[in-house]
Image (cartoon, rainbow, N blue to C red):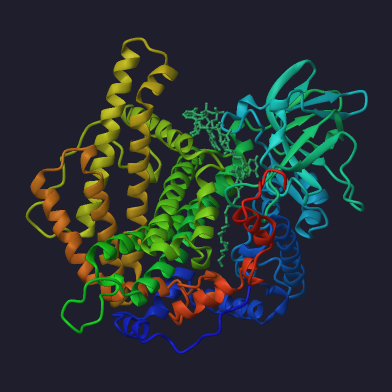
Amino acid sequence: MTNPVVQKVNPMLTEERAKASFPVEELTYILDGGKFNTEKRREIEELVTKDPNFEHPPIQFMTREQQYSLAVKKALLVQQRLKELDMLDDPYASYFFRRIAMPREVSPIGLHWVMFVPTLMGQCSDEQRERWLQRALNYEIIGTYAQTEMGHGTFLRGIETTATYDPSSQQFVLHSPTTTSIKWWPGGLGKTCNYAVVVAQLHTQGRCHGVHMFLVQLRDESTHRSLPGVVCGDIGPKMGYHTIDNGFLQLNSVRIPRENMLMRNAEVQPDGTYIRRVSNEKLTYGTMVFVRSLIVSDAARGISEAATIAVRYACVRRQGEPSSPGAPEPRLLDYPVHQYRLLTCVANCYGLWFASEVLRDLYFTVQPDVLEGRTERLPETHALSAGLKAVGSNRGAACVEECRRCCGGFGFSEASGLPKIYNDINPACTYEGENTVMLLQTGRHLLKCVERARRGEQLAPSDAYIRSRPTPQPKLAGGPLTADLLLGWLRWRSLSMLLEVSGRFNSFIEQRQAWADAFQAVSRRLTRCAEAHCILYVGQAFLDSAKAAENPKICGVLTSLCRLFLLNEVVSGAGDVQLSRSDLARCQDAIDSLLTELRPNAVALVEAFDLPDRMLCSVIGRYDGQVYEAMLQWARQSPLNATDVHESYELYTRQFLAGRSLAKL
Ligand SMILES: CCCCCCCCCCCCCCCCCCCCCCC/C=C/C(=O)SCCNC(=O)CCNC(=O)[C@H](O)C(C)(C)COP(=O)(O)OP(=O)(O)OC[C@H]1O[C@@H](n2cnc3c(N)ncnc32)[C@H](O)[C@@H]1OP(=O)(O)O
Ligand SMILES: Cc1cc2nc3c(=O)[nH]c(=O)nc-3n(C[C@H](O)[C@H](O)[C@H](O)COP(=O)(O)OP(=O)(O)OC[C@H]3O[C@@H](n4cnc5c(N)ncnc54)[C@H](O)[C@@H]3O)c2cc1C
């Protein structure tokens, strides 16, 4: 991928940039978590941009094999560079290095650092960490996280792979007893990795102790050939993620040493005795909680990219009836409905961005306690990471798609960069727990919170608004529709919905239905409660961040954007609870006013994300706004244009036109 040469900037974009009412650079510092981080990120971006090794033609014109091969080379080159630059121990620096070096190539070794290493950190005993972690951190071994099977993804307890302990050899025998037990999906498993954390049912002394994790070597460390008993490969082309070899794995009685069971929370002793050190079995699922919290920020980043492209394009694209004879055609951004479509995406992006920071802080606050077996705040963390992962990726996919449609036909072209952003974000709705299933986890937690509130027990901070009795509806009529008032209304909505569903649930229980059946009976409604709870969390994080901005101009614009987010939620959630027609009309009017107010800042709000052209990989979202010339240049690169007459003409079309049968060819 080559950086587009910045040409003379399109005056329409210059004009829009001049309208910003706040210092864009300062907002960038806030988004980056401080000026220091912004400067560091830019230094890294420059390093990568200057490095010719990371340049290549657009991957969209390559075959899948070429894309995979290129991605392997770049991913490993990134590791080498990070080592040379002594940046391996700096998560912020190495994260940005990877992003800018591989902006549109999902990394074949991504699972190594997102799941394999975190699992070793969270699930190994101290001694096991000594043995494996440093090797993994040094990339002497490359691993993946192999949990999902053909037959089971969601229902983890249904996993069929077995790990049977053999005390005579002090080994575990890892086995895939059925076709449905074949591991399916793990990233990098097909061709790239030589190790995997394998999730399997642990059997010892004739008893099954449920799912546990095992470190399994898959390939020889020098030849990379798969080891005896290991059958693995790529699962084939997917909707996106072409650069990564999601794989399958069949284990035929593969033996591993006893010490390869990850033993932080439970242990099998040499004689086969099973000992559980920590009572909470769900600690085994810790890596998923971590990754779910990361997915929220990833979704926000996806929207930031799509919105930057679509907003810039909306400033330079003219289409429609001129307002007066001789006047230019209107820009897309001049249409209020277009402003609504784009600015609500921008508002969602900021909301998720700030919420992901709060969630990440919560995770890192709670994690040290969890590692020591103190799990009091685990249910809240699990419920939030599951629910926000679902809301974040759902919104992420929806907003990116909206931005894509906002770009008309060009949005469908790979040249826009938008299909790729969509295809990268969309699978997050499925992986790390399918979104509906995740919302049900949050809903289950919320139901239990109502029960605890009824018993007068204390609830975790993010659940503290939950009571066992309804509260009065905040009045939206009369005074100004402030962000605090709107947030209060969303809090009331969330509680009202939850109490209604909890009441139904209790009535099923009183009718002597089993807990699980009563849960199913309210599950559809419960997913809406979970969404409302998560949106409240996003809104709170957004408003807190807006208020925390020291510069009053930034505080002002963020508060307005936050109000747009909250109002849009009130309007779209009006059907969940009773909102009067007049209140609804007031909210709609307030949205119209906010669009007019925010429109001059549309470009500034997306450019605060500070995404260089190299990152956006978009012909229509370029900084210089020179869209049409660049589009022509892009099309010229299509391999179909390598010759004037394509070979298919000689082979088929000529024969067809001459009336010859194609069947024999
Ligand atoms: C200077 C600044 C420094 C900053 C530096 C930072 C810079 C870095 C910037 C960071 C950004 C990084 C961004 C990186 C990009 C990340 C993008 C991510 C890409 C990742 C690629 C991922 C690839 C995909 C991988 C996978 O998919 S792996 C497989 C995942 N599989 C699943 O998720 C399966 C889903 N199923 C389940 O989880 C469970 O089975 C279930 C929860 C659905 C049900 O489980 P079960 O039936 O056993 O349980 P119950 O429903 O009966 O519940 C029992 C109780 O247990 C609780 N529970 C369940 N799960 C958990 C859990 N995980 N933790 C805690 N508790 C849990 C239930 O709630 C029940 O509780 P109760 O009984 O009390 O009610
Ligand atoms: C791109 C990608 C990368 C992946 N990477 C990995 C990886 O690295 N490692 C790994 O182990 N796995 C990986 N996965 C697998 C992923 O975690 C699973 O696909 C996911 O957890 C869903 O499981 P499933 O495919 O079995 O879907 P299913 O569980 O069969 O779900 C199908 C549908 O049924 C619904 N459903 C299921 N159960 C319930 C229920 N109890 N109540 C209501 N509705 C329900 C779901 O909502 C869903 O819509 C990856 C998947 C993808 C797409």
Numbered disc total: 0
Residue 461 percent across, percent down from the top left: 38, 45
Residue 155 percent across, percent down from the top left: 57, 28
Can you see residue 515?
A: yes
Can you see residue 36?
A: no
* The quarter of the picture showing ligand 1: top right
> Which quarter of the figure is the N terminus placed in?
bottom right
In which quarter of the view is residue 231 placed? top right
User: In the image, is 382 to the left or to the right of 659?
Assistant: left
Q: Nearest the camera: 310 or 566?
A: 310
User: In the image, is 332 to the left or to the right of 62?
Assistant: left
Q: Nearest the camera: 24 or 474?
A: 24
Residue 464 percent across, percent down from the top left: 34, 42
In which quarter of the view is residue 69 placed? bottom right
Residue 322 percent across, percent down from the top left: 21, 76
In which quarter of the view is residue 333 placed? bottom left
Extreme residue in the front direction: 659
Give the residue at x 76% y 70%: 83
Above or below — where is 403 with respect to 161? below
User: In the image, is 629 to the left or to the right of 403?
Assistant: right
Q: Nearest the camera: 332 or 397?
A: 332
User: In the image, is 574 to the left or to the right of 148?
Assistant: left
Give the residue at x 25% y 47%: 572
Give the residue at x 79% y 60%: 138
Above or below — where is 86 with respect to 350? below
Extreme residue in the top direction: 512
Give the residue at x 32% y 77%: 551
